[in-house]
Amino acid sequence: MPTTLEVKKEIVSILLVDDEPRFRQGIRTLLDFYNISGSLKFNVVGEAASVEQAIGLTVEQHPALVLLDLELPPDDGITVLQNLSKLSYPGKVLILSAHHQDEWVFNAMKAGAWGYVFKDQLAMQLCEAITTVMNEQVYLPPDVATGFFRLFQSYSTQFIHAKNQINLTPQEQEILKWLVQGETNEEIAKHLYITAATVKAHLTGIFKKLGVVSRTQAIVKALKLGLVCP
């Protein structure tokens, strides 16, 4: 039995997303080395240096994998992940980031990333990370995974405690989640296949349970109580 992960013998199309041209060139060099030395082949179908370019090229080129930096003008890589999720992008996104903080990892994975690699460990981990996510598995190195699950457990504990206190229904919880993400009543209705009037009625109940009178107050209180993750 093989002891290493294997993927289909096919060429993986990749989009490189980073605002530093030299870093993108370094990734290309690594991928070229993998093409020569490994069984998995890669083809870079485009490069992006901003949020808008990243989303546009993903829609245009349909890469199987996006290698995404989290520091992108004018916003950040999380915005790219959120937009690709809304567009039902079928490929994978692997984060390549200089940020080691647990919160960055947690927020990236929550937004839909399949893996997270620190930039100072790329030479050692990139090939394994790509192979892992292309095998439909999440990639987190041990040191990254420890922080991620520690934060996940913390948010889960806060969420359960706050949910029990406020006593939101599953529908109200779902509406609150979309509210915190900035969605309008009409957009929330589309997500949940209900009417905007029903969303409005639920929001009235949510506001009452939270003891607030506006959408902004509801968002702030929900975040403070841990009812939704930031």
Image (cartoon, grey):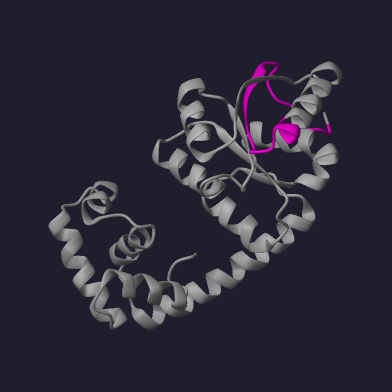
Residue 23 locus on image (x, y percent) = 74, 35
Q: In the figure, 133 relative to 188: above or below?
A: above
Residue under the image location 28 percent in, 83 percent down: 211
Residue 3 locus on image (x, y percent) = 84, 34
In this view of the protein, can residue 15 be seen by the observer?
yes
Q: Quadrant of residue 18?
A: top right
In this view of the protein, can residue 1 be seen by the observer?
no
In the image, farthest residue toward the left: 197
**Residue 73 in the figure: left or right of residue 191:** right
Residue under the image location 34 percent in, 60 percent down: 174
Could you say which is closer to the camera, residue 193 or residue 67?
A: 67
Is 16 inside the magenta-drawn segment?
Answer: yes
**Residue 184 in the figure: left or right of residue 127:** left
Residue under the image location 56 percent in, 57 percent down: 107
**Residue 207 in the figure: left or right of residue 35:** left
Quadrant of the drawing holding the N terminus: top right
Could you say which is closer to the camera, residue 207 or residue 97?
A: 97
Residue under the image location 17 percent in, 63 percent down: 200
Q: In the figure, 226 relative to 36: above or below?
A: below
Residue 128 locus on image (x, y percent) = 78, 36
Is 108 inside the magenta-drawn segment?
Answer: no
Could you say which is closer to the camera, residue 14 or residue 142?
A: 14
How many marks the image carries: the answer is: 0
Q: In the figure, 172 relative to 8: above or below?
A: below
Q: Which residues are magenta?
A: 3-24
Q: Quadrant of residue 24?
A: top right
